[in-house]
Image (cartoon, rainbow, N blue to C red):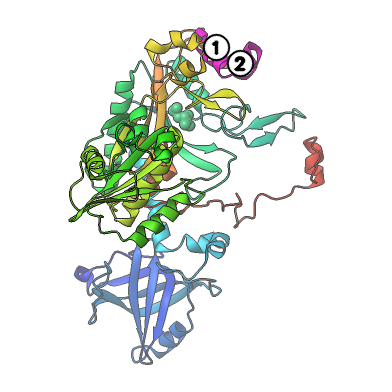
Amino acid sequence: MYRTHNCGELRISDVGKQVRLSGWVQANRDFGAMTFMDIRDRYGITQIVFSLEEDKQLCESARKLGREFVIMIDGKVRERTNKNLNRDTGEIEIQVNGLQILNSSKVPPFTIEDDTDGGDDIRMKYRYLDLRRSPVQKNILFRSKLSLETRKYLSDLDFAEIETPFLIKSTPEGARDFVVPSRMNAGQFYALPQSPQTFKQILMVAGYDRYFQIVKCFRDEDLRADRQPEFTQIDCEMAFVTQEEVLNTFEGLTRHLFRHTLGLELGDFPRMKYDDAMRLYGSDKPDLRFDMVFVELNEVVKNKGFSIFDEAELIIGIKVPGKADMTRKQIDELTDWVKRPQIGAKGLVSVRYNQDGIKSSVDKFYDQDALQQWVELFGATQGDLMLILSGETDKVRKQLGELRLEMGRRLDLMKKGEFKPLWVLDFPLLEWDDDTQRFYAMHHPFTSPKKEQIEAMASDDREVLKNLRADAYDLVINGVEIGGGSIRIHDRALQAKNFKLLGFTPEEAENQFGFLLGAFEYGAPPHGGIAFGFDRLCAVLNGQNSIRDFIAFPKNNQGRDMMIDAPSEIASAQLDELALKLNIK
Ligand code: ASP
């Protein structure tokens, strides 16, 4: 037997027991007469002591143990004189009376402690050592708990876990596919699924009623902190449901997950239409941990001789409470911030409501009476600062949305540990792309338009089509989209109509999605569903940004796995077998 207890288990009530522990040497402190050591495993750290007086030979072997050696010790639990109350085992230590080295270790390239001295690259290369660190282990174990709780909640509601294939058919819609050459069908390729979307719909046609899967999805896109080429979804679908039932079911899942992982009861899940989210926050995923709702000023600022506002399509601003004391210099710095190419505003108008009146950066054009009107629209009181941007509607909304978030960050309004969920509803069905001069599905081509708008889908008028709204919804928490889904089209004719709007010829639609159109001819029930970004959910629950910290073996920003060194070249014999020829310039 390698151990009677793990390294995180012993307490003051165990004093006097003879125990055996196994684990890794974290630290070795030699004080001559005594050698103290920390021994670590997944469950914690226990201090062990070797005494020269008690056993000289044992003490000498102990001094030779390096960091990360794997050892097994026998000893007696005793109360520590110098207690460490930050550690669960900090009231006791083990007086060692037996030692066995189970394996030695090279000196690790970085310290395996909570705060490590290793840079990103080296930790990715030696991922097995990074994974040994307690904060990383905590994240990975959190993830395991989250998937277990997901399964519990969904299986209690009769959701069946059904696997769908990874080798599927490539389609040009959506993101770029990862493709896999087929040896047995030379010149042909599988694609890895971007999501199991069509399969889960087919499962509804097949009568499985409620499906879920915690499943890998693959998208060949440029990477960021919150994006990986392979990522995990909690993918779900339900038959015979309305949007209302889907929202309630997955509000329930979210509440269950917060309750059973963080012990936290979430508050309301308010609902907001996409159009309102854009109008009031300039984003389809507003962070509701703070206000600063947009105020529209068109009516009160135009025709006063200030050409920038006169020419603008939209003039909007936010009220920053209590910040009228910002200095000129600080406002200039903020102006530079909004003018950076990443934000792209042309300028910033500021209004400070101070003791001595209302002061704006455009006083030349607007007198106190005019500014008083602005202040009323903002609902501002003395001490408040107002920040105003103008320009084309979509652009200026986005810019002010960024400024709002920046002010939230600067004023420390996005509190860690606070969670504000939000359903965003009624997304547009279609999105026009100027470059390719065509519509794309805002969510995906299987999303149902709102019932009352089906007729309008026959219109040729681009504006009418842009205004079509879908039964599509996103779940947002603290400004992060953690899930999205829709009620689906389940009627062959309507699906064909939607493909047509997306620029598919009937042949293309048949060629790519014929199986689904075919299935719709054999009694497809009304259905709808959702998918949660599982990695992101892990990160959001922990108040973190990077999903990489919640994936055991992530890729770096170049899409490489640094530990196994992938992707890599393959032998020419392998290429031949796949009937492939490289053409690298
Ligand atoms: N398959 C969709 C996605 O990956 C989610 C859904 O509509 O259920 O975004």
Q: Report which quarter residue 291 is drawn in.
A: top left
Q: Is residue 309 above or below residue 498?
A: below
Q: Position of residue 306 (x, y in %)?
A: 39, 40
Q: Pointer 2: residues within 10 angstroms few (<14), some, or many (20+)? A: some
Residue at image point 43% right, 48% down = 347
Q: Which mark is residue 406?
A: none
Q: Position of residue 302 (x, y in %)?
A: 35, 34
* Tag 1 and tag 2, C-beta contact below 8 Å: yes
The part of the chain drawn in magenta is: 492-514
Q: Position of residue 193 (x, y in %)?
A: 56, 32
Q: Is residue 67 above or below residue 300?
A: below
Residue at image point 49% right, 73% down = 69
Front residue of 301/423: it is 301
Residue 355 visible in image? yes
Front residue of 110/154: it is 110
- Label 2 belongs to which residue? 509
Q: Total marks drawn?
A: 2
Q: Is residue 553 left or right of residue 404?
A: right
Q: Amino acid at mark 1?
A: Ala
Q: Is residue 404 above or below residue 526?
A: below
Query: In what element is the residue under mark 1?
Result: helix
Front residue of 524/83: it is 524
Q: Is residue 7 above or below residue 77?
A: above
Residue at image point 40% right, 14% down = 526
- What's the CA distance linking mark 1 and mark 2? 7 Å
Q: Pointer 1: residues within 10 angstroms few (<14), some, or many (20+)? A: many
Viewport quadrant of the N terminus: bottom left
Q: Report which quarter residue 246 is drawn in.
A: top left
Q: Which mark is residue 496?
A: 1
Q: Report which quarter residue 456 is drawn in.
A: top left
- Of labels 1 and 2, earlier in sequence is 1
Q: Position of residue 116 (x, y in %)?
A: 45, 69
